[in-house]
Image: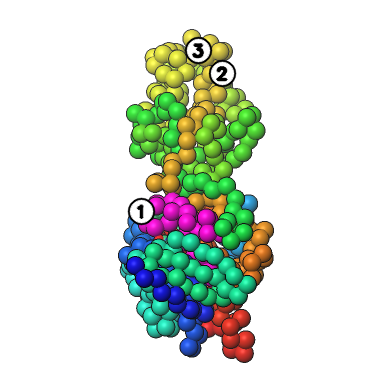
Amino acid sequence: MEITERVFDVIIVGAGPAGLSCAIQAAAPKSRILLLEKKGGPGTKLLLSGSGQCNITHAGDINNFFARYGRNGKFLKPALLSFTNQDLLRFFGEHGLSMMTGENGKVFPETRSSADVLEILIRLCKERGVAIRTGEPVTGITRTSQDFCVMTTTTSYRSPILVLATGGSSYPQTGSTGDGFGFAKSLGQPVTETGPALTPLLIRNFPFAPLAGMSFDALPFTCWREGKKVADRVGDVLFTHLGLSGPGILDASRDIRSGDIVRLSFVGTMKREEFDDDLTRRVQENGTWQVRTLLAAYPIPERLNRKLLAISEISDDIRCSHLSARQRAKLIANYTAFPLTVEAPGGYKVAMVTRGGVTLETVNPKTMESKLIPGLYFAGEVLDLDGDTGGYNLQAAFSTGVMAGRTIQKARTPDKKSR
Ligand SMILES: Cc1cc2nc3c(=O)[nH]c(=O)nc-3n(C[C@H](O)[C@H](O)[C@H](O)COP(=O)(O)OP(=O)(O)OC[C@H]3O[C@@H](n4cnc5c(N)ncnc54)[C@H](O)[C@@H]3O)c2cc1C
């Protein structure tokens, strides 16, 4: 097949929310902007997001967002402040799509349709003259002193400005297969170790599999590695057939690795000592009661109480007066810090995002341009950024995409204000 070479002002690789929003902002009259997408259409993952309803951002003060991206939230501060959740609402509102706040502050399009969000992004790209080429995977990128050479399966393109918006490695069927990490490395841009995040945990010999579907609001849990605490959280937790899920576990998963011990506390905000004192007093005061009856005083599902008694090797009908100190200690340990060994965090097929990515220290947080390679920009999940559930990942993709796009637009047309 004959390979032709085409020249553009800006090439953006990846037509997800980050790449599309970057293209919209970067566009200027007569500018030649190319957006390359490997899938048959743009925004495949966006269409899946929020089960197709698109939890696009979160309500509330933008200053409360930074902590929702773990240790790396600080990097996002300039991008989030220059294109906030309110700016995002205004942007889509101006283009005909209102937003509404649902449960727990999650913000969705009023139509509850990811397709409506995507339609606006594609329409604006077209109106602003962005060339979108789909079904055209980028296979390699090289750099000369003047520009970047971007090879696809059919064509070779050149441009002085290149944006990598290729997403992470999760849900590979959506086109995000980690290609951007390889491109960044090949250009000399460091990339951290990457792995699945916002993912359920597979638990070794999961004892609560028969209780799959049982969920807990605001369950305290910790995570331990080689005796050191690596996470201490309170969140909603769900038992699955294979282990743990639910928003609390998904959010914590970025810090959890195979072999870690997750300890669940089923007694809510009660500390171990408090539960110990309370249970001991109740046992002493109610010697003739069955332990099972006494445990019903705590807000714990009965089926779980039975399971915890069985796991603690305590007979279902034992009376309080017959509960030995050793049995009571075991019960207290299992109710306040039940240990579960993580076989593995769920893989990329089930993880909603990817932790790790292009090293943040090598990227300017006020422009999204590489500090090492002039003209190279990054936007979205390809960066070492991942947020909690609740709309934080899409907001980060939009805010970083907008920031990269505005910077590029300003740099190319210094006398004009960005749009
Ligand atoms: C099931 C699911 C539900 C989700 N729900 C939500 C939600 O409700 N709210 C929320 O905030 N976040 C949600 N997320 C996360 C969110 O969708 C992502 O964080 C976001 O899409 C990242 O945007 P991005 O533009 O950086 O990358 P992506 O959306 O992954 O887009 C990257 C694009 O680059 C393309 N690409 C990759 N390599 C190449 C190549 N070599 N050549 C050409 N193109 C390439 C890909 O095909 C892809 O289209 C969800 C994720 C999943 C998997």
Residue 312: % across, % down: 47, 18
Residue 366: % across, % down: 64, 70
Residue in the picture at 56% in, 58% down = 186
Comes first in the chain, label 2 or label 1: 1
Residue 391 in magenta stretch = no
| Front residue (pair 266, 58) | 58
Q: Say what secondary structure mark 2 lies in.
A: helix
**Distance in Å between CA atoms under marks 2 and 1:** 49 Å
**Distance in Å between CA atoms under marks 1 and 3:** 54 Å
Q: Which residue is mark 3?
A: 323
Image quadrant for the N terminus?
bottom left
Residue in the picture at 48% in, 14% down = 320
Tell me, for residue 173, which label it has, or none.
1
- Residue at the front extreme, as displayed: 2
Q: Which residue is mark 2?
A: 329
Locate residue 263 relative to residue 17 in the image: left or right: right
Q: Is residue 404 visible?
A: no
| Front residue (pair 25, 225) | 25
* Mark nearer the viewer, 2 or 3: 2
Q: Is residue 209 visible?
A: yes
Comes first in the chain, label 2 or label 3: 3
Marks 1 and 2: in contact by CB < 8 Å? Answer: no
Residue in the picture at 43% in, 56% down = 176
Comes first in the chain, label 1 or label 3: 1
Q: Say what secondary structure mark 1 lies in.
A: helix
In this rendering, is residue 201 above or below 174?
above
* Mark nearer the viewer, 1 or 3: 1
Residue 204: % across, % down: 45, 28
Give the class, few, some or many, for how many residues have Cα within 10 Å of label 3's Cα (few <14, many ≥20): some
Look at label 2 and name its amino acid.
Answer: Ala
